[in-house]
Image (cartoon, rainbow, N blue to C red):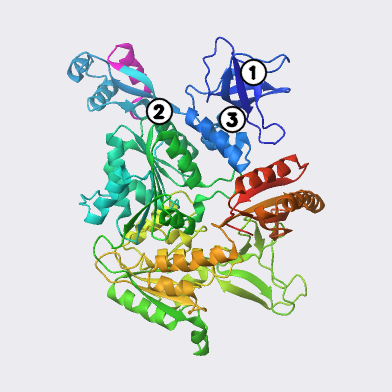
Amino acid sequence: MIAEVIVDISTSEIDKIFDYIVPPDLALQVGDRVKVPFGRQHTEGFIVRMKDKADTTHPLKPITAKLDAFTPILPEMIDLMWRMCRENNLRLVDVLRLFIPAMMRGGRVREVKRHFVTLAENVSFESALSTLKANAVNQRAILSVLAGGGEWAAILGEQYGFSAIAALAEKGLVKVSEVTKRRRPQLKPVADKVVTLNDEQAAAVQSIMHGDKDINLLFGVTGSGKTEIYLKCIEEVLSEGKTAIMLVPEISLTPQMMGRFRARFGDKVAVLHSGLSDGERYDEWVRLLRGDAVIAIGARSAVFAPLKNVGIIIIDEEHDGSYISENNPRYVTCEVAEIRRAYNGAKLVLGSATPSLDTFRRAKDGEIGLITLRSRVNGTSMPEVRVVDMCLEIRSGNNGILSAELVDRLGRTLKDGNQSMIFLNRRGFASFMICKKCGKVMKCEDCDVSLTWHKEDNLLKCHYCGRPYVVPDKCPACGESDMRLGRVGTERVIEEIHRLFPSARTLRMDKDTTRKKGSYDEILSAFRMGEADILVGTQMIVKGHDFPNVTLVGILDADMSLYYEDYHSAERTFQLVTQMSGRAGRADKPGVVVLQTYSPRHYVFAYARDNDYEGFFRKEINIREVTNFPPFTKIVRVLSSSEDEERALGVTKSMLAKIRAYQKEHPERFVAVSGMKSPVKKIEGKYRYQIIMRLTRPEETDTLFHVYEIVNAEDKKNVSVFVEINPQNMN
């Protein structure tokens, strides 16, 4: 028997199939990880196919060893690998690595085996105790512990001595077994309320589970009870003996969602996300693979959960950009979910109050189902949105971060004993430092971006590579000591709130305050328990959180995402504003949103003020159609990066010439093609050049595959080249 193996080395030259002989003493199958001889060394690999004979006359080497006691990659995932690689031009090994915990590679994590002590079979506590002498104090104490159940040998040995355990085992009174000790994520319990679905919710469950569409958009205003619909659908799927995958966009939402699911489904739930320790992630993954858990909850990567017989996949806040992987290997979570749905004959639910334009267009066109929830479950109205013109604030003499109306409402909210949330999508104290005399902006040496000042650490930091810099006493270009700070961040907002309201208790939630494990849950739990009056944060606080005592939401610099050089900018701004607004007034207290902007008459804010998603959709989709942007075309970006700028430029020019030659042959397939420096021309010491093209829809697949051929044929020595489809970040 011959095994086709992908070796675990991520380079384009080696990313192909190698044949190996299957030794008769190894029980191997497709999906196993194996050790194989490769060149002068041994390396790990993945079996992706088996066959009776080799396709070559060259002598073959045998596989050395099987690396796991189980088969880690399911047949479904092997099929998924072929498709992802073909459609996204990915390396086989990079996709295979998505399917297993990273620390499995190289044996850096494995199951923890521990000795567990119980009373021996057919031995009762009383009978065992009667055989011991009165002075065998430690042995008798151990038996007393075991009378209530088993205990870890390490715990008993530390308290009563390992010799006492050994003596009891030798007498046949206790049994010492080697068992797997699970490393479980720590979760705070959440009380599971008995909920009766309202008519809208019940109809939604019926449509999802028994309607004529296998893919449905659950389009519901914030607070309309989408989570309870998810729970009911999963209950039905489990009753049929199937499994479920539940995806959330932010790690910060996982503890909250996990708490509700654990309360409802107990140990059937496993969590997968990057905030777990290596051991916790491995153990949760193994539970899913073995069927000990049948519901996977997590962020984007949980779409690859090793579950068989999947009955439903739910993507909450489906519009969120975090569902698109912008690092190698690049993939779109929704596309992967659709492939897994089709393989299993499952249901796919896309939930959002502000769905992506493409998803809503598909629903409107009847390609997928559309289920609408128009009211909040508790009958409360949507919060009032107050749009504040910051230009008028400046003209009236207010040059501060907070408008007069927001300051006034913060004071009233504090006085009433309610809570507030302030959103600013920029962390740090100030987002750049500039010399007043010569205009030099302090930039990262490895990345072509300005540095952000973090006051707490008194450091300038690069938010691309993370490199810290000492704050200069004077300008390194002209020697001037008068340096100015520009554009505020979350740190500065907290400082301003403390100046205005010294007694206010505040919390800050951004990447800087959530680096420590468990910090997400600590901050959110503290706010939920009323330990703070005001929560200031970035996008982490926008989605899915339910704080019943929040009656005021402030949105600062709402224009920030509006004027990016990106066709998504209006859509993203509407989504952020609407989602953040939805945090206010979710219980029995009315909510107010103060939206600060320098463009109060922009159509995005008009539709957001009225909570009119469908009106915004009609306006924006018309603009996209007229201007030939997605979803009516497909944007393809080919990005080259290298420490050698000339090499990156040369590869880009060569590919651009071939693409333009193809464009001349098929002009009807292209809207535009251009080559340029990337807007951020250097990141982590690598220079970046890009080719941007817009493809017409009818023959986009053929054109895209031809672009892949051009990229793959290029000599990419010392240059990294990748292709992105409809990139979320054009920088």
User: Where in the figure is residue 503, as x and y percent of width and height?
Assistant: 37, 74
Q: How many marks?
A: 3
Residue 456, picture quadrant: bottom right
**Which of the pair 235/296 is nearer the observer?**
235
Q: Which mark is residue 375?
A: none
Amino acid type, callout 1: Tyr
Q: Earlier in the sequence, mark 1 or mark 3?
A: 1
Q: Which residue is mark 3?
A: 106
Q: Main secondary structure of the magenta part?
A: helix
Is residue 699 on the magenta stretch? no
Give the residue drawn at x 72%, y 14%.
57
* Residue 24 seen in the figure: yes
| Secondary structure of residue under mark 3 | helix
User: Where in the figure is residue 112, as x and y percent of width and height?
Assistant: 45, 29
Q: Is residue 644 left or right of residue 92?
A: right
User: Where in the figure is residue 408, as x and y percent of width and height?
Assistant: 38, 81
Mark toward the viewer: 2 or 3: 2
User: Where in the figure is residue 149, as x and y percent of width and height?
Assistant: 25, 27
